[in-house]
Amino acid sequence: MMRHRLGVPIAQIPPDAFDAFFKPRGVVLVGASRDPAKLGFGVARNLAGGDYPGEVSFVNPKIQGELFGRTVYPAVGDVPDPVDLAILLVPAALTPAMLYACGKRGIQAAVISSGGFGEAGGAGAHLEAECLAVAAQCNMRLLGPNCIGIIDTHNGLNTTFLAPPGPDQGEIALVSHSGAMCAAAIDWLVGRGFGLSRLISLGNQLDLDEADALEMVASDAATRVVAMYLETTADGRRLVEVARGLTIPVVALKVGRSEAGIRAVASHTGALAGSERAYRAAFRRAGIVRAPTIEAMLDAARTLAWAPLPPGRRMAVLTNAGGPGVTAADALEGSGLRLADLSAATRSDLARSLPAGAGVANPVDMLASAQPRDFAGCLQRLLAAPEVDGALVVFPPPPMFPAEAVVDALVPVVDRAAKPVVVTVMGERAVQVASHRLRTARIPDFRFPEAAASALAALADRAEALSAAADSRPDPVEVDRTDAEGILARAAPGWLPTRECAEVMKAYGISCPSARLATTAAEAIEAAAVLGGPVALKVDAAEIVHKSDVGGVRLGLTAVDDIRAAFEDLASIGGATSRKSTTVQVQQMVESGQEVIVGGVRDRQFGPLVLFGSGGVEVEAQDDVEFALAPLNGTDVAHLFANTRAGRRLAGYRSIPAGDSKAVEEVLFRVGWLLADHPRIEELEINPLRVLFPGSGTRALDVRMRLA
């Protein structure tokens, strides 16, 4: 499908465009400068001073001669072949014309490092539209504007103006919306002893966006992990698709977690939806590991690159001191991991090699007298235990040995291990040598247990994402799409009338109680007689979304006089609306059972989302809901059940009998397909969905649907 940005069509990035950015035969910098205080000087220095083997040319009509041993040309058209990539550092107002000159020259790709575009207001946004139009005309791809560019450490390409030294060669790629974050991350990585493979600074992402960048860095053979600093997403669904298709892990920090995303607050579903919930659901579907902080993102990336994945979440703690062990245990559980319950055989095996006062439960406390061989031997025993999925070793410098002696004993054990091990050497000045040796051995090291536990959790999250991918196909359901298409095609924008809502539910195999609409008390009495048994009366006015909030529901009515009185009350409530509706719905009462909410909302960035949780009139106050991208798969439904009280209650809880969880699963799948099939549906809410006893199904007691 053709994408558009600012009204201009943008084709999917072709594979050879990757080479134009990261393997260009030649690069030209437009806006080179001799002034060390200017960015054009910094870019020229990095292009000319690195190991990049291609041709490097500079353009600036105000400079003659050479710069860093390279000829400075007056115009792009004067630059000799080959040249595939242009770096533009010229005033924003001159950029469209300069792009056109590059396109005329045959250049395929351009990095616009200049600022003063969309981030500067309306005039800058107009310049962005001009640049995009020129790029489309010239079949050119753009990175930026307002970015620092790209780095490939393995071929020496550095188009940034960042001060040397640049990042070391490594296997972690970084994609960032923030150029300043790139600079800080590079310095942090160098200080922590690991390097980058590729870096992309997206800036305003006028053309290439975060999904394109993810494809570009993940296609690199040297990249084993991708770290992403995201402020927004240009095409959320495509980001999910790209990430799901990768064989390497992606860890991301999403900032700006406010609930400022598109929401329609008229329904419970719309009010509960928000950008943060949408990102959680999208990242889960994509298998992207979510990081809470910048440091945690980079730590997780390093750990994913260096350590094997655990078979589960059961972790062991090995220490020589009680306080660090307890701190590590708390940190593991706080990160969503579990302390392994060591078997009697494992505890007995540990006890044989440790002093009588040592603790052989988990955490394993070897006491301060532990020698390096004790660390190695106990770690080996823990990793061999089938009940242990990974280990966190934590110790302050031992009183009788240097910390590096412990590390030297641990390294061979960790090298042979099939399970992950992270090491926390607590301190700073006295552990520098130990830390360096751990990094040389590619063993993730930390100063305190909290960071180590977070990194182990990232490994477990990645392992579970890979397992979930095996059940990633949407569940197929049989539905009558033709009937629903006809109803929705004829309907006007806004809230769909009650009768049509019920017809759409029927077309998608979702059961509603028998019901009739009445415009007079006599019709209501007749409808109750036809339906039989107790009935519920509900006000039927499009402007009244939450009927209970206005007293618009009467339940369990059988007597004629009660039905007549209820109709008159409800008709007066509906008549008070601007449309003066006096229609009342007469609905057959349904046997008791659990109540849940099932709904859906169309997110601006990620498309349709399905909601599930505790239903009823206080659904927002309970805030017991989870979201998943539509259409759903089995893993999504399992997540919705496991992460809500409503889902867990379906198995029965204290005096609450079990509900028909299989029928709820079926409704969730069908709602997911309904939202995916019909883009006009902006909001859908079934609240409550009455869940009957196992084998008895569900009933959608109240359905609301809003169309674009």
Image (cartoon, grey):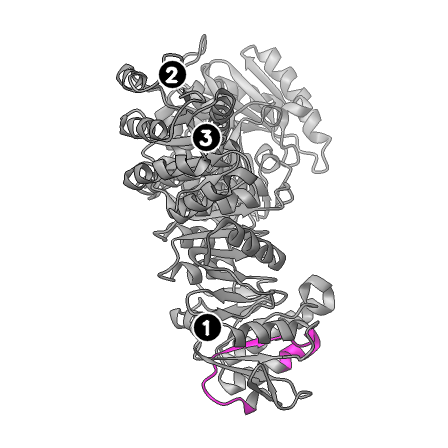
Point out residue 99 in the picture as x, y percentages from the top left corner. Answer: 59, 79
Outermost residue to the top: 655
Tell me where residue 186 appears, x and y as whole percent: 54, 56
The residue that appears at 34% across and 52% down in the rendered structure is 247
Q: Residues within 10 Å of mark 2 (few under 14, many from 20)?
A: some
Q: Name the one closer to the observer, 12 or 26.
A: 26
Quadrant assignment, res 573: top right
Q: Is residue 49 above or below residue 558?
A: below
| Residue at point 64%, 38% (across, down) | 265
SS under mark 2:
loop
Q: What is the distance, in whole Å, between disc 2 and disc 1 at their CAs?
A: 70 Å
- Residue type marked 3: Val
Quarter holding the N terminus?
A: bottom left
| 637 relative position to 614: left or right | left
Asked if the residues shown at circle 2 and circle 3 are in contact, with their CB atoms under 8 angstroms apart, the answer is no
Q: Determine whether the residue tagged by mark 1 lies in a helix, strand or loop.
A: loop
Under circle 3, the secondary element is strand
Picture quadrant of residue 631 = top left
Q: Residue at label 3?
A: 394
Q: Earlier in the sequence, mark 3 or mark 1?
A: 1
Q: Is the residue 290 above or below the residue 20 in the image?
A: above
Magenta range: 78-97
The crowd level at tag 3 (other Cα within 10 Å; few <14, some 14-19, many 20+) is: many
- Residue topped by disc 2: 693
| Residue under label 1 | 51
Tell me if residue 389 is in the magenta stretch: no
Residue sitting at x 61%, y 70%: 113
Confirm whether residue 568 shows in the render.
Answer: yes
Q: Are marks 2 and 1 in contact (CB under 8 Å)?
A: no
Residue 478 seen from this side: no
